[in-house]
Image (tube, rainbow, N blue to C red):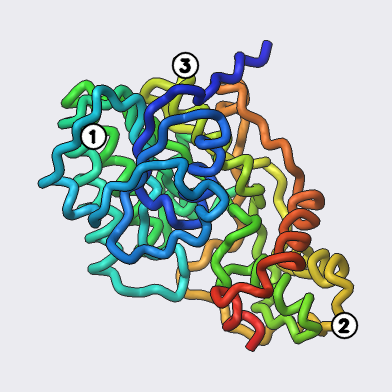
Amino acid sequence: MTPTVASLAGVRVIVTGATGFVGSAFVRHAVGQGARVTIVARTGADSWRLAQVAGQYDVITGSLRDLASLTLPLDRVDAFVHCAAAGVNQSFDDVEELVATNVDGTLAALTFAARLGVSRFVLAGSSGEYGPGVALREDAALHPTSEYGASRAAATLLSRAFGARRTLDVVVVRPFAVFGPYEASYRLVPYAAVQGLAGKPIRISSGEQTRDYLFVDDVAEGIGQACVHPAATGGVFNLCTGVETAVRDVVAQIAEKTGARSEVVAGARPAIPGEMWRTTGDPSRARDVLGWVPRVNLDEGLDRTIAWFRQEGTNLAHYAASTA
C-alpha cells in the first residue's frame, strides 16, 4: 500500500538556495501548501523566481558563511532545506569555490541548523554523486566523474556523519535531470526552447548521452515529503522517473513542440570533460517509503515548460543570451 502523503501546512521551514531553480520551486510549493517559509539570501540576490509568492516568506539576509554569527528569534524550526550549491553549470570549473560552497557551506548550514534545534535537515543533493549508471539505487557506490559531483558527495557524507553525532535528523534527496520553467538559460531544455521559439539553430554535442528527466514541480513535492514524512528519518532518496532518454531525443521533441524551423545541429558542441554518458535512477524507495511518485511525464513537462517560455521566458533578460 502506498504511504500517505504528508502536508507542509503550518510547518516552519528555512531554505537556502531559495532564489535558485530548484530552491525557488520548493519555496513556491511550500508557500502554496501553507508552510511558514524563511529563506536565506545574499544581499542583492535576484529573487525573480519568487515573484509570484512575494511577501509570503521571510528573509534572512546573508551568505552561508554568515550563518555562524546569526541568532534568530524563532520559537521552532521544523525543517531546514539546504538547496544552495555551486557548479550546477557544467562549465564552472572553480574547484575552490565548489568546495567552499558545497562542502564548507553545507557545514555552516548544518551547524546553524543544529544550533537552532531543527527537527530535520534536508539536503538537496545530486545524481552526480553516483557518477554514471543505469537504474541506480541509493545504496550504489559513489563514483562521481567531476569535481562538482565529488563536492556534492562530500556534502552528503559530511551531513550524515554530522547528523549521526549530534542526533540531527538528516535526510538526503538526489534529484536527477531536473527541468522546467525558470531553469537557467545555459541548461539544455531552456536553451533549446528559446532557440526553437526564436527559429534559431539548436547546437548540441553528439546528443547520445542519456538522462533521467524530471519536472521541477515533482522535485519540489519530493523535497516537501522529505521534510515532513515520518518514515523519511535518516534516509537517502532518489527523485527520478527511472526512464532513460537520450539528449538528442529531448531536443528533437522540443524542436517539434516549438514549431521550430530551427536546425538541430548535433556535434556542434564538444562533450564536457567528466560528463556522465548514461544515468538513470531507481525511484522505488521514494515511492515505497514517502509515497512520492512523479506526476508529470517528459512529454507533459516539455509542453508546460515551452508554454511558460512562450508566455514569459523569452521576455526575460535572464534568457537573452540564449538566443544569441
Helix, strand or loop at disc 3? helix
Q: Where does label 2 land, which residue? A: 261
Going by the picture, which residue comes out furthest to the left? 69
- Residue 128 visible? The answer is yes
- Residue 137 visible? The answer is no
Helix, strand or loop at disc 1? helix
Q: Where does label 3 land, which residue? A: 231
Q: Where does label 1 land, which residue? A: 113
Return the x and y of residue 18 as percentages of the image width and height. 42, 50
Q: Which sits earlier in the primary sequence, circle 3 or circle 1? A: 1
Question: What type is the residue that disc 1 sits on?
Answer: Ala
Residue 144, above or below 71: below
Give the crowd class for mark 2: few <14, some 14-19, many >=20 residues within 10 Å.
some
Return the x and y of residue 199 as percentages of the image width and height. 81, 83
Helix, strand or loop at disc 2? loop
Q: How many marks?
A: 3
> Rounded to the nearest whole Å, what is the CA distance between mark 2 and mark 3?
50 Å
Front one among 172 and 108: 108
